Every structure is written in C-alpha cells, then in structure tokens.
Amino acid sequence: MDTTRHERQTGAPEAVVRGTLAEGGLLDPVIPAMIEAMPDYVLVLDRERRVLAANSRLLNAFGIADARALIGVRPGEALNCIHADESPNGCGSGRHCRNCAAVLAIVESERRHAQAAREYPITVDRGEWCALDLEVVVTPVEIAGMGLNLFVMRDISAEKRRRVLEQVFFHDVVNTAGGIRGLAEALATENLIQPEDEMHYKQWMVTLSGRLVDEILYQRSLLAAEKGEFKPDLGIVEVGGLLREVHALYANHQVTADRYLVLGETAECGIISDGAILRKILGNLIKNALEATPAGGTVVISCAEEDGRLAFRINNPGVMAEDVQLQLFQRSFSTKAAEGRGIGTYSVKLFGERYLKGKVAFTSREPDGTTFTFSLPKSVIGDW
C-alpha cells in the first residue's frame, strides 16, 4: 500500500485512517452486505471523495487483492487511472480531471443533494493501458451521522463498441460498397460508358473493392487489439513509397474537397513494421486533419529521421480547444456530432503505442496549428 498517497489524501497514516473509520461504525456488516448485493462495481466514498469500502466485483474486475489497499485513496487512484497522479494533489486535481465525468457527477450530486449519473470514459493502467467506458451513478446518503456517497459504476464498453461499429464501420463499408455498386451498374449498362473510359472504371472498381476488404480486416484487427490478441505482421516498409501512397489516396479523397494535401519532407529509408497498420494510422491522422481544416486550408504530411527515431508528422492550420485536447484519445470522444464516432485517435494510440511500440503526441497552438507526431524506433534496412 502506498502510505504516501494516504497521507496526501487524508493527512494521516493508513492505521489512523482505519481507526477513524472503525470509530465511525463503518465496519458494521450492513454496508459490506449492501454493496455486495449490487451487480455493478461499487465504492463507498466520504465527502472528501476518499474510498471507505469497495465490493468484490470491483476488486475482481480491477485485479485488486485486498480491499484495505483502497482505503483513503480516491476513485481514479483506486482504478489506476493514467491521469490520477499527474498533479501532486492526486486524483481530481490534474488538468485532465477538469472534464472527468466521475468528478463532475460527485460535484453535481452534492450540489443538488440528489443522485447524478454520467458516462465515464477512463483509461487505466494494468501494466499496459486499457480504455473503458463506464456509466457512473453517484448517490448521496447519510449513515450513522456521516455524509457518504455511493459511487456505482456499470461497464458499458461493449455497448459503446457496438455503437462504434454501427456508426463508423457500417457507415464506411456501406459508402464503399455503394461506390462499387454504382460502378458495376455503369459497367453493366450499355452505352453509358465510353469505350475509352471502360478500363478506368474497372480499375476504379478494383481499387474500391480493395479498400472495402482493408476496412473489414482493420475492424477485425481493432477488435483483436482491444482484447490484447492482435499480432503485428512485421516486414520491411519502404517509408517514402508509403507516404506517396497515402498522399495519392487522400489527395483524391472526398474529404479533401476544397482543401490542399501537401507531401513535404520525406525520409527515403526502410523500417521494420506492420505496413497495413502503419498505413491506417497515417490515414486516420490525415483524415482527421483534413476534416478539421477549413476550405482553402492546407494539410502537410512529412517524415524525418530524428535521434535514432523516424517521426511522421501531419499538420493542419486549426487549433483545438483545450477541453478537446484533454479528451482526444478517449475511445468514445469525438468532435463530430454522430454518436459512436471517435475511434480514430484512440485506435492510432492503441495500435501505434501498444503494438508498433511507437509514440503518439500532438501540439496545438497559434500560430503553428495542430501537429500530430507518430514516432517509431528506426530499424534501418538501407537507403532507398
């Protein structure tokens, strides 16, 4: 148990905290029996948001061997939220905590003296980071003269994942399949296509068919990656050729309408990586940049060797609001209105960092605009 964390939260060592709880009557079997009967993850908090008790469902789900290890810490610390320790004052005090649904639900509940519920996306560290979508319900109660909060969490990750598949996967698949159908109908209709254009239409149909297969395979890889079952297909990737390929694809993409996509500095070398996943990572970043760029704006793709690493950069002229920046890599967060969107930057971080062993970062400020950087260890095969 981290006694320093206890002292920071409570001002007293762990033994004193437990003594205080016992004097308050909170070790009475009523509370453990009550929270054990609940089918969700449950924490009992005092009005300083410190944990007093937890049920076994939560302990089992988050791999916590001893409930006493949680006494005196706060929810983000109990769940190992990756942002819990970004401020010396702990969970609830960091930059990312400003938009934390758990904190906001507790504040709302106490302000209204009533139950409050919010969707609670959280990224936890279980040896490697894992994104969860929870729904948190906070209920203020009073027991033995003490004001407490019942902090109940339900895992809605499967439901959110289904929405992502419906809104993103099926949307993209239907659009691509619709394009293939239109080309097929044109080719099947006599006198609709000039003979000199027929080969062009056929090649376009082949390209769209390949894109459809790639999208299906990528979604299968994404599901495997979230379960920790994905295995990268490593091989030699020619960096300059890859950048020219994704530039050509998105320079003629519908999202690029009235915008400019420029290929800047390019490193002509080879690396060991999964070419299909690397292509998808760059594609997601390019598409997001184009969607964030106003008509007439320019998106620049570049790649350079820096300190033994290969850094891919995608820059657009826009600047993101701070609350957007703080939530950017959450699985279900999106600046788009459609429910279920938001898988793009999350999947970039998931594949890029966990499986390709790279690093995803961004800056967003005037006058430079927004730049996403994906850097990889440079295993050079040779100059190309």
Image (cartoon, helix red, strand yellow):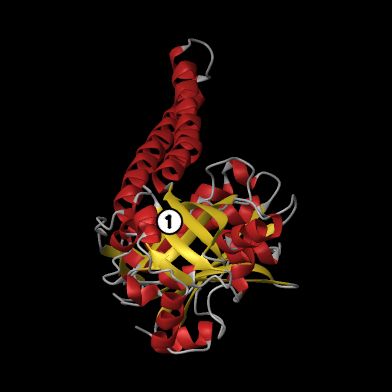
Q: What amino acid is at disc 1? A: Leu
Residue 203 or residue 290, whichever sits in front? 290
Spot occupied by residue 122 in the image (x, y as percentages of width and height): 48, 61
Which residue occupies 42% across, 57% down? 42
* The N terminus lies in quadrant: bottom left
**Going 57% across and 51% down the picture, which residue do you hit?**
118
Q: Is residue 243 visible?
A: no
Residue position for label 1? 132
Asked if 185 appears above or below 285 in the picture, the reply is above
From this view, report whether residue 369 is shown above or below residue 287.
below
Q: Is residue 162 above or below residue 360?
A: above
Badge 1: how crowded within 10 Å, few (<14), some, or many (20+)? some
Where in the figure is residue 254, as x and y percent of width and height? Answer: 60, 40
Dot 1 falls on a residue whose secondary structure is strand
Foreground of the two, 320 or 192: 320
> What is the residue that sits farthest to the top in this orientation?
190
Q: Is residue 351 left or right of residue 312?
A: left
* Residue 33 percent location from the top left of the image: 34, 55
In terms of image quadrants, where is residue 234? bottom left
Quick one: quadrant of the C terminus? bottom left
Q: How many marks?
A: 1
Along the viewing direction, whichever of 277 and 271 lies nearer the viewer: 277
Q: Nearer the viewer, residue 108 or 244?
A: 108
Instruction: Give the answer, above or below, for where 277 lies relative to 86.
Output: above
Residue 100 appears in view = yes
- Where residue 185 appears, as percent x and y from the top left, is 47, 16
Q: Quadrant of residue 378?
A: bottom left
